[in-house]
Amino acid sequence: MKSYAAVDLGASSGRVMVGRVGPDGLELTEAHRFPNRPVRVPEGLRWDVLGLYAGVLEGLRAAGQVDSVGIDSWAVDYGLLDADGALLGNPVHYRDPRTEGVAEKVWATVPAEELYAATGLQYAPFNTLYQLAAARSSAQLPYAKRLLLIPDLLTYWLTGEQGTELTNASTTQLIDPRTRDWSHDIASRLGIDLGLFAPLRQPGDPAGLLRGEVLEETGLSGPVPVTAVGSHDTASAVAAVPAGGERFAYICTGTWSLAGLELGAPVLTEESRAANFTNELGLDGTVRYLRNIMGLWLLQECVRAWGVPDLGALLLDASKVPALRSVVDAGDAAFLAPGRMPERIAEACRASGQPVPESPAEITRCILDSLALAHRRAIAEAQRLADHPVDVVHVVGGGTRNALLCQLTADACGLPVVAGPTEAAALGNVLVQARSHGLVEDLADGRRLLTRTQPLTRYEPRGDAARWDEAEARLTRR
């Protein structure tokens, strides 16, 4: 067996996991977990990327000797380097308001329809393209000689080598999903210098060796290679969907819910754009055709406002609240910013003429019903737009711990839900590293290994689909 360190950075926490992989075994253990707390400074909301890097180093120290290291993280955000390779300021957080109104300015040059036909990426105000447009007036951008997405930035600090991993690059809205290369036409028309980006890397490509200083600080014995993985955490999570030969949809749950299909080619129709589906790149030539849904961010913010109550007791109380009493649009950008989440959810219900949830249990049930409804809508529309029916929904990520959400998703979709693995992004990260050493043949082989080794829970649909139809109609009438 070989050991692999999977650095998996989420929007609220980071972790270093160690995966031990052999021909018939896969074991995952946590070496170190650390918070990811954005910082609000006078100029806006920023990532504490130095704190994250310190957490990575501490995690590698705790991991012990490994055969390779891989890094995945959230998408779209980046750091700028000067001519000496030094970081120009703290990376901007995607929830920072600097991109407000920017998309409309971009569309004045490249209409939204043309932008989607060229890049296949859904509209989100924080896409890297819009961040770069917003940064034009900044003091930093003119001095930047390199732009590195977050996992590529940390890889650079570990190895001294620069690259741009493809699955994460596909979230910038500057990649053509048909050619799996940069969209030079879009970049040229918008005045974006693609020379800022380091050369593209594929998942599985070597990304350098740990620098001597890193070896000294972590206590590891070199050489230790760093391997490019599916560095967008959703790409790694989808790689870890334990699917066999069945036709499946997936939902990657966590701060966000990413609900969609794995396809062999992008869907670039105008109807797909209007439905706000995205075509991000996955492993082995696949396309992640999905919709971004606000996810458990809604509950995380409420829990923070309530003073971090006992989550198990809260979910138990929520399960006793009448179903579908009140629902909100879980994809509404009105819920994107942090702060006052319980009040904002109550206000949305009041504005739509629904009963206003008041207690934490009522608000929690409203959130979970709303997420299940959003999952239902996304899975149904993805099947129709891609002409790709499915028989089962795989739920992976942190939301698999929430049995109520998994059951509600099965009820809403009218399909069986298979929940697990929880640490899907880290497992997908490990599988790509294992494949680079010949321990896993391909994506299908890795998924078979997961099916044999990871605990999975199956939820059968129950209840009346008409109730979900009625709740959907309530949102539509808004």
Image (tube, rainbow, N blue to C red):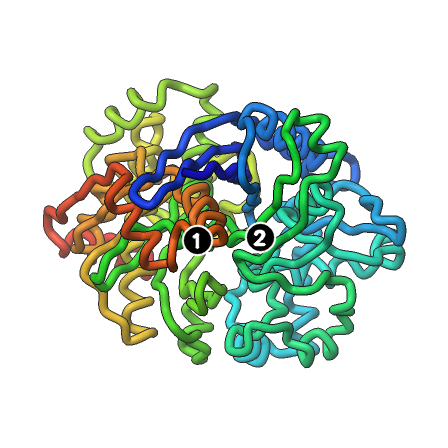
- Residues 318 and 280: in front is 280
Sort mark 1 into few (<14), some (14-19) or many (20+) by Cα contacts within 10 Å: few
Q: How many marks?
A: 2
In the rendered structure, which amino acid carries the disc numbered 2?
Ala
Q: Position of residue 64 (x, y in %)?
A: 55, 26
- Write the residue at 64% across / 31% down: 221
Looking at the image, residue 377 sits to the left or right of residue 221; the answer is: left
Q: Is residue 146 above or below residue 386?
A: above
Under tag 2, what secondary structure? loop
Q: Is residue 323 above or below residue 287?
A: above
How far apart, in angstroms, are the residues tagged by discs 2 and 1?
A: 15 Å
Q: Position of residue 193 (x, y in %)?
A: 78, 69
Q: Is residue 113 above or below residue 81?
A: below
Q: Position of residue 403 (x, y in %)?
A: 25, 35
For the C terminus, give its image quadrant. bottom left
Indicate which disc residue 438 carries: 1
Looking at the image, residue 272 sits to the left or right of residue 362; the answer is: right
Q: Position of residue 345 (x, y in %)?
A: 42, 40
- Residues 360 and 435: in front is 435
Depth check, mark 2 against mark 1: the one in front is: 1
Q: Quadrant of residue 219?
A: top right
Q: Quadrant of residue 181?
A: bottom right
In the rendered structure, which amino acid carries the disc numbered 1?
Gly
Indicate which disc residue 84 carries: none
Indicate which disc residue 228 carries: 2
- Write the residue at 75% across / 46% down: 160
